[in-house]
Image (cartoon, rainbow, N blue to C red):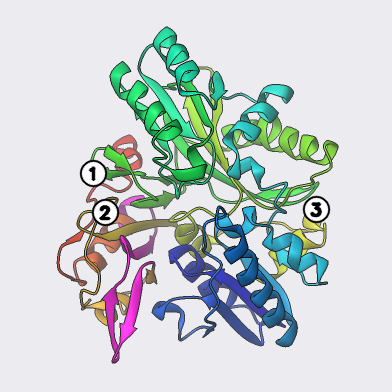
Amino acid sequence: MNALVVGKGGREHALVWKLAQSPRIDKLYVAPGNPGMADLAELVDIRVDTPVSERDKLSAEIDRLVAFAKERNIGLTVIGPDDALAGGIVDRFRANGLKAFGPTAAAAQLESSKAFAKELMERIGVPTARHHSFTDADAACKYITAQGAPIVVKASGLAAGKGAVVCHKLDDALATAREMLEDDAFGSAGSEIVVEDYMVGEEASLFALCDGEHYVTLVPAQDHKAIYEGDQGPNTGGMGAYAPAPVMTPALVQEAEAHIIQPVLAEMRRIGTPYQGVLYCGLMFTDEGPKVVEFNARFGDPECQILMPLLKNDLVEVLEAACDGQLDQIQIENYPQAAVCVVMASQGYPGSYDKGLPISGLDDASAREGIVVFHAGTTRRDGAVYTDGGRVLCITATGADIDAAVANAYAAVDEISFANAYCRRDIAHRALNRGR
């Protein structure tokens, strides 16, 4: 079959890399893709990474992509970006008789509206932090003052992974609420906010591939959202990840499936929006058991970059089964290894940063055994690769265990250089400390 991946970052590079290994694939396309994918798939200059708030522009690009998929007889399309999902790309593909892996716009509200997700969890008793939603800044600040700090303030809409602010001081929480609701700090994504209790515990990520009724889960992972080592500083889209995450034992996976994934899928069916696609469950392991931090409606980034190298199954068969309502016929198999991803970023990210800096050492790093270099924010000019984003490269390593994978990943990182490159040097620190 011909297949299409939608997106341009490290997550999509990992999906392209895995799909390209399937004997089922005749021709693979990616829109718009990046230079790292060029040897695996044909790059298509159609972009649907437009913010969902720019609906007319996003809709026009989706129309172009639908036309392309029809013209090239695309048998399976895999959607990466959250804005495209929230903008209804899966609805449009299905309406045109095209198979697309991902939730409809209505189902994607589990990510695109934190208020929707919180209300759903509260209604069916899924464990999560106590919370309230607000569209009025004065009302939000009155509630925050009554609750005190620490407290978490979240933009309800899509904010590129940066819309959740943990406030350890009351003044910071009040200022954050007003910045979102009155100063448009996150645009329309922050026109409604969710204020929730600060949860204490260790976080992990559990990904369920869903067909509307059935599901399969992948290896539990843990990412590192904060920019600085020791999990300090502002949140980013993700500075690294590893799997398996030892905090999430098989017993805890079963508990999360029984008390979170199954009830959510059942409720989504009940309200007429069956969930097909990836359901990312961000979980906090508290003294009271696992609680939901948030849901995402697509593969995580950089978690996808560690999950794909560990997955033994043919990804085409798994995703087709999800689209066809047949995941009950799929048994997930994983390689008995660990995987670690270290993100190399531009200095200044998640704030302002320079672009257009030449990158060297990519071939040397990629030649190392057990290493895959996934491109996140790069561009190619005159045969050379340059930086073109905040998160530039995702260096993924596999190994017999977490220690070996960490050592392998940083050895590859040290082969690569570009001006003002930055990475955290403590990826997987929780697993390493637990092991020692």
How far apart, in angstroms, are the residues tagged by discs 3 and 1?
Answer: 41 Å
Q: Give me the residue at 66% from left, 78% from top.
A: 3
| Residue 250 lies within the magenta run | no
Could you tell me the amino acid type at mark 3? Asp
Could you tell me the amino acid type at mark 2? Tyr
Q: Position of residue 414 (x, y in %)?
A: 19, 66
Instruction: Please indicate, yes or no, whether residue 313 appears anywhere in the rendered image.
Output: no
User: In the image, which disc is placed on residue 228?
Assistant: 1
| Residue 394 lies within the magenta run | yes
Question: Which sits earlier in the primary sequence, circle 1 or circle 2?
Answer: 1
- Residue 435, quarter of picture: top left
Could you tell me the amino acid type at mark 1? Tyr
Residues at discs 3 and 1 in contact (Cβ within 8 Å)? no
Q: Where is residue 231 in the image (x, y as percent from the top left)?
A: 28, 38
Q: Give the range drawn in magenta.
A: 376-404
**Count of numbered circles in the view:** 3
Is residue 145 shown above or below 43?
Answer: above
Q: Quadrant of the C terminus?
A: top left
Question: Which sits earlier in the primary sequence, circle 3 or circle 2?
Answer: 3
For disc 3, the neighbor class at 10 Å (few under 14, some 14 to 19, many from 20) is some
Q: Give me the residue at 58% from left, 35% from top.
A: 114
How far apart, in angstroms, are the residues tagged by discs 1 and 2?
Answer: 11 Å
User: In the image, which disc is placed on residue 271?
Assistant: none
Residue 408 in the figure: left or right of residue 372? left
Question: Which sits earlier in the primary sequence, circle 3 or circle 1?
Answer: 1
Residues at discs 3 and 2 in contact (Cβ within 8 Å)? no
Residue at the spot of label 2: 349
How far apart, in angstroms, are the residues tagged by discs 3 and 2?
Answer: 42 Å
Residue at the spot of label 3: 328
Instruction: Please indicate, yes or no, whether residue 352 appears anywhere in the rendered image.
Output: yes
